[in-house]
């Protein structure tokens, strides 16, 4: 089982890469930082592969931030 810090780090890494913005942090909102549906689809695909569990664009949208998404995914994995 992965730790919450590992999951959060993986999400943040991919999100920064997709958004081309190294300044993003775990509490930034996906949408207010310029995220759109294409970004959510790309991030969902990368996370599903990296974390070895299905992550949907809807889950990312509903979570709102990296930290909340990491918490959601950890709860879902249990």
Image (spheres, rainbow, N blue to C red):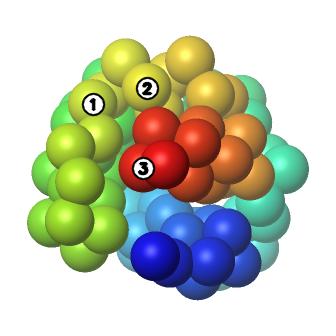
Instruction: Read off the residue under disc 1.
Output: 56
Label of residue 40 in the image? none
Task: State yes or no: discs 2 and 3 in contact (Cβ < 8 Å).
Answer: no
Residue 42 rendering spot, x and y as whole percentages: 22, 48
Instruction: Give the number of the mark in front: 3 or 1.
Output: 3
The reply to whether the C-beta atoms of the residues labelled 2 and 1 are less than 8 Å apart is yes
Which percent across, then down, holds residue 75? 58, 42
Residue of label 3: 77
Mark carried by residue 59 = 2
Q: CA distance from mark 2 to mark 3?
A: 14 Å
Find residue 61 and report its horizontal and vertical position in percent.
50, 22
In this rendering, position of residue 7 left or right of residue 52: right
Q: Vertically, is 3 above or below 35?
A: below
Label pair 3/1, CB-CB below 8 angstroms: no
Instruction: Determine the residue positioned at 37% across, 18% down.
Output: 58
Closer to the chain start, of discs 2 and 3, is: 2
Residue 14 in the image: x percent, y percent?
41, 70
Considering the numbered disc 2 on the image, is that residue within a helix, a strand or a loop? helix
Q: Residue at x 46, y 39 (%)?
A: 76
Q: Is residue 53 above or below residue 9?
A: above
Residue 63 in view here: yes
Left or right: where does residue 57 sit relative to residue 78?
left
Label 3 or label 1, whichever comes before in sequence order: 1
- Name the residue located 68 percent from the left edge and 47 percent from the top edge: 71
Tag in front: 2 or 3: 3
Tell me the crowding category of disc 1: few under 14, some 14 to 19, or many 20 or more residues within 10 angstroms, Cα based. Answer: some
What separation in Å lies between label 3 and label 1 (alpha carbons)? 14 Å
């Amino acid at each position: 089982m992965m730790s919450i810090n590992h999951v959060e780090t993986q999400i943040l890494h991919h999100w920064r890469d997709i958004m081309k913005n190294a300044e993003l942090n775990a509490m930034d909102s996906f949408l207010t930082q310029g995220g759109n549906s294409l970004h959510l689809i790309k991030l969902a695909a990368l996370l599903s592969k990296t974390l070895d569990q299905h992550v949907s664009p809807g889950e990312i949208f509903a979570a709102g931030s990296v930290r909340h998404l990491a918490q959601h995914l950890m709860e879902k994995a249990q």
